[in-house]
Structures are given as structure tokens and as C-alpha cells.
Image (cartoon, rainbow, N blue to C red):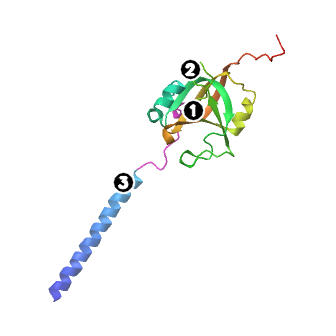
Amino acid sequence: MKLYRYLKSVSLVLLSAGILTTSAVCLERVSAQPAAVAAKPAAQATTAAVTATPLGIVNSPSSYLNKNVIMKAKFDKFSTLGLDYKPAFKSSDDYISFLVKRDDTSHDIPLSEMKLFLKRDLAEKFIDLKTNDEIEIKGKVFSDALGDAWVDVEQLTILKKAPEEKSNGEK
């Protein structure tokens, strides 16, 4: 019986020593790591953007998922399309969406398969955008919910203003 107790005590001591040794090794490995990783400079932090067409992105949104994109398009109108949709959530309190025109037809059809979101404070700078203004969009495809491209627009540039339409009374 004494031998049994002795062996039980020895095995318990050995087990405890093994746990302490393992813990010490793990602690050494963890503490050998740098405490904090320095942030990359802003110039290196931005990733290269892929130049694409709106239809190219719409035809294969999963190929562009989580990628920065640059595209040129014709502005159609501001909208609320896609706002507050849970799987690809952008709050209508913070964002406004807008549509661009399809470039594969001569008819006046918006490209509703592409959801473009602009922060409201940035959108206020573009309140004078008119239908057919040529724009450049820089943003990130953040979702492909419903098989559509959902783009968080980070920069919007007006390339060319559309000519003013004359009213029926003017010549």
C-alpha cells in the first residue's frame, strides 16, 4: 500500500513538473514575440487598385470581393437602393447610394446590379451631379450578396460634366 501511495505521489510530482515545464516553454515563446507590430506607413498601407469596368465587376462580383477597384462610368442618380440590407449592411443614417448607367446599351438604363455607397458627408460635396456626368469611382467591393457587387466608394471624381439639356422653349 505504501508503494502505491509512493508511486502515486511521484507520478503526481512528475505530472506537475511536466505541466510547469510546458507552461514555461509556451510563456517563453509568447514573450519572445514583439510586444506590438508597428503600423505600416500610409503609403504602404494602401493596396493597389484593380482597374475595371462596372459591367466587368457586375458580371463577376466574387472575383473582385475585398479588392480595391477603379472604374469610370456615367452617373445616373442618387438612390436609397441597398441601404439597410442586413447581409451587406450600410446604414441609411451614414450613407447614400447612387446608380451609374449601363454602358452596354444605347438606352437610358441604370446598372442596378451594382450597389455604390458613399458616406453622406462626402456625398454632400457632389450634390450638383447630374445624369450623364462622367465620373471616376475608387472604392472597395465589400460584398457579393444576392450575386450583386456592393462597393464602398472611397473617392469620387467628376471627369466631365454632361452638356446642359435645353428645355422645349429654348433653341
* Residue 55 horizontal/vertical position (percent): 52, 26
Q: Quadrant of residue 7?
A: bottom left
Disc 2 element:
loop
Q: Is residue 77 left or right of residue 10?
A: right
Q: How far apart are the two marked residues, 1 and 3, measured between alpha carbons?
A: 40 Å
Amino acid type, label 2: Thr
* Residue 63 horizontal/vertical position (percent): 44, 33
Magenta range is 33-46
Q: In which quarter of the image is the C terminus?
A: top right
Instruction: Please name whichever residue, 43 or 167, is drawn nearer the observer in this view of the structure.
Output: 167
Q: How far apart are the two marked residues, 1 and 2, measured between alpha carbons?
A: 24 Å
Disc 1 element:
strand
Q: Which of marks 1 and 2 is nearer the N terminus?
A: 2
Residue 6 located within the stretch drawn in magenta: no
Residue 29's disc number: 3
Q: Is residue 8 left or right of residue 57?
A: left
Q: Identify the residue position indicated by label 1 in the image.
A: 139
Residue 26 sits above or below residue 83 on the image: below
Q: Is residue 110 left or right of residue 93?
A: left
Residue 140 sits above or below residue 109 on the image: below
Q: Identify the residue position indicated by label 2 in the image.
A: 105
Residue 59 sits above or below residue 23 on the image: above
Q: How far apart are the two marked residues, 3 and 2, measured between alpha carbons?
A: 61 Å
Instruction: Please name whichever residue, 121 or 54, is drawn nearer the observer in this view of the structure.
Output: 54
